[in-house]
Amino acid sequence: MSDRRRKLLLRATTVGCVVLTGLGTATAAGAAPLADSTVLPQVVASLDDAKCVKHSSRTAKATPWPQKLIGIARAHPLSEGGGVAVGVVDSGLDGDVPALSGRVSGAHADCSGHGTFLAGVVAAAHTPGVGFEGVAPRARVIGATAEPEGYGGDADPDSVAAGIRSTVDGGAQVVLVGASAVRSSGALKAAVAYAQEKNVVVVAGATDSGSRKVAYPAAYPKVVSVAAVDVAGAPLGTGGGTGGSTADGGAVRVDLTAPGDRVLSVGPGGGHYTGSGDSVAAAFVAGTAALVRARDPHLSSDAVRERLRATAVRSAGAVPDPVTGYGTVDPEGAVGAWAGDGAGGKSVGGRYEAAAYRADPAPAKVASGPVWTLVGAVAAVAAVVAMLAVLIPRGRARGWRAP
């Protein structure tokens, strides 16, 4: 087991308690965080206007388990995401949330609170006396509102496409798609290609949190697809956590995993909420991508994607794993992996390109026949040497005369 994997497992068992202001409620270390759903309001990944979240005035003082598990604070001495804009395509974005104040554009009414929640995971600033902060607390956020398809809570793919384009045109260097579509469309494919042409990293949840179906655009190969894990680092039972397939049997493509079980963040009104699912996990990866882009602005979007994969904390076995992809995102590792030209990459058109990801090579297999042949030959030589060691002294003693 690698040292980085061992440290992640150690942190997973010692993530500490979450103490809530004025509620006297805590969860034991290693237990499911915020198990009592009445403690904080929950945001739901839905575009259904009938599921509006109530404003929360409650806040949590302690550092939440995801921040501890993936060691977000250890990346901040190197990068806090300053100068990078992250697009959030979701249910809307409340620009009046104090933790995002002065760094929001494209704000719209956010009924479900999900878009604001994801923006908080990405970029919420540190608040004195509060343990929660975003992955990239100095990054800017550009909001785009996706529209539902029909009467369900799933996003219309063409609407998601429009959101991607608008945030890219607004200057986003990373785009987080929180509102997933459960079907592809020509417009959505074209929007992802447009983002690639503009050197933008697109991140999305591997499955749709509501219907547990394959999500788009995460299913596209150029998008960083993220699946959620719980406090112990185990995949959730939402698509990516069910053996690489969804509830309807669709195959899921997973690049990375990240915390996605009752995660804490801000929401409409500025209080704290909880949320779960692959889209929540994707917010941690989008924030990490912002840290990398701020630290290494010369990297291309492809190079950032490869950096995230290459520095992930992997479980045992071959990668990519059908359930966990290349492993759990590691903000500190991704940011600390900065290297100049000639150190695992190359300069292409004045822009640094990371070397392609390479898994640790498997031990070479050696056929047993040649091995035993070699062993036999060595034994035979050893026997001859031993025999000569006895005969030569005797021969010298007799003057090489026959006995």
Image: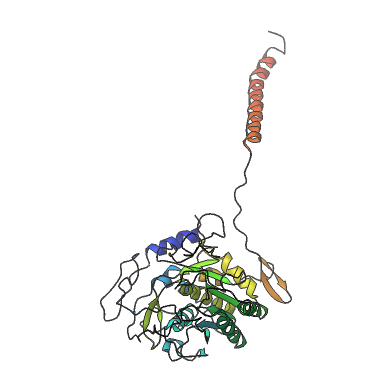
* Colour scheme: rainbow
In this orientation, which residue lies closer to the viewer: 160 or 141?
160
| Image vertical order of residue 81 relative to residue 336, above or below | below
What percent of the width, then of the height, locates residue 339? 63, 70
| Image vertical order of residue 347 relative to residue 319, above or below | below
What percent of the width, then of the height, locates residue 373? 66, 31
In this orientation, which residue lies closer to the viewer: 129 or 269?
269
Can the viewer see residue 84?
no
The reply, left or right, for residue 81 in relation to residue 358 is left
Task: Name the residue located 61 percent from the left edge and 84 percent from the top edge.
Answer: 165
Q: Residue furthest top?
A: 403
Can the viewer see residue 256?
yes
In this orientation, which residue lies closer to the viewer: 16 or 209?
209
In this orientation, which residue lies closer to the viewer: 346 or 121?
121
The reply, left or right, for residue 152 in relation to residue 54 is right
Q: Residue furthest front?
A: 150
Which corner quadrant of the image does residue 292 belong to? bottom right
Count of labels in the image: 0
What percent of the width, then of the height, locates residue 207? 50, 70
Which corner quadrant of the image does residue 51 belong to? bottom left
| Image vertical order of residue 244 relative to residue 296, above or below | above
The reply, left or right, for residue 251 in relation to residue 261 is right
| Image vertical order of residue 16 relative to residue 115, above or below | above
Q: Residue furthest right?
A: 349
What percent of the width, then of the height, locates residue 331? 51, 71
Q: Which quadrant of the rendered structure holds the C terminus?
A: top right
